[in-house]
Image (tube, rainbow, N blue to C red):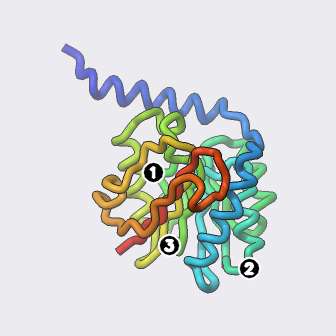
Amino acid sequence: MPDFEIIGHAIGSIAQDAMYESFEEWDDPRNNEIFPVLVKKASDLIGGQANVLDLGCGSGRLGGLLRDSGSVRAVYAIDQNSENVAMAQSYVGTGKVAQGRAQNISELFPGVQFSVIVANALFEPEVLMFNEPNMMQMLKAIYTSLEPGGHLVASGYLPLLIERRHLKEVGFKVKQCAIPRNAFNDSNPKQLYVAQKV
């Protein structure tokens, strides 16, 4: 009898890889509402020159805004799509952009620890293919890649697959969980998590 759980995870992984390879970067106008909030939140958390990672960077526009904020030493970025990686390099500038999976942060940037990791839309169910074990691997990789006291700033359109319990299970202290209107001042259904490595 085949192990359907293993087969299911394998199919999910293949489907996710295919989705990322075929995913075209598009400039969602809703990002104009999210990006300023993420940049301000990240800048407030940094408080000085620091390494920041834009995880699932897409075109790299968010990474460029973080670079231009003045509180960042270097912006790093990761995306699975090679076209996005090429685009992101122009936004990130002197920072480093790598093609790969979020679970492989430490392999893509060995020896680098981050003050802040920003993940916009990365925890939306469609992006994660509704795969909770995959998400937990990603959260563990994020936790490991943060410096002590570092922060994850995650946002996306509701419903997000990530919940407080997932962050706590990995070891994060959840500092903020904002719902629509109390962080973004608009009617689009978004959520924001800020979690600290303790």
User: The C terminus lies in which quarter of the figure?
Assistant: bottom left
Instruction: Please tell me which residue lies in front, 11 or 194.
Output: 194
The image position of residue 116, as x and y in percent, is 54, 70
Quadrant hosting residue 175:
bottom left
Residues packed near mark 2 inside 10 Å, few (<14), some (14 to 19) or many (20 plus): few
**Mark toward the start of the polypeptide (1 vs 2):** 2
Residue highlighted by disc 3: 113
Residues packed near mark 1 inside 10 Å, few (<14), some (14 to 19) or many (20 plus): some
Residue highlighted by disc 2: 70
Mark 3 and mark 2 residues within 8 Å of each other at the beta carbon? no
Q: What residue type is labelled 3?
A: Gln
Q: What residue type is labelled 2?
A: Gly
* Direction bottom: furthest residue: 48
Per the model, the C-alpha gap separating discs 3 and 2 is 19 Å
The image position of residue 6, as x and y in percent, is 29, 28
Is residue 60 toward the left or the right of residue 123 in the image? right
**Mark toward the start of the polypeptide (3 vs 1):** 1
The image position of residue 82, as x and y in percent, is 69, 42
Count the labels in the image: 3
Residue displayed at 31% across by 65% down: 171
Residue displayed at 65% across by 64% down: 37
Residue displayed at 36% across by 66% down: 172
Name above or below for residue 45 compared with residue 165: below
User: The N terminus lies in which quarter of the figure?
Assistant: top left
Numbered tag placed on residue 103 in the rendering: 1
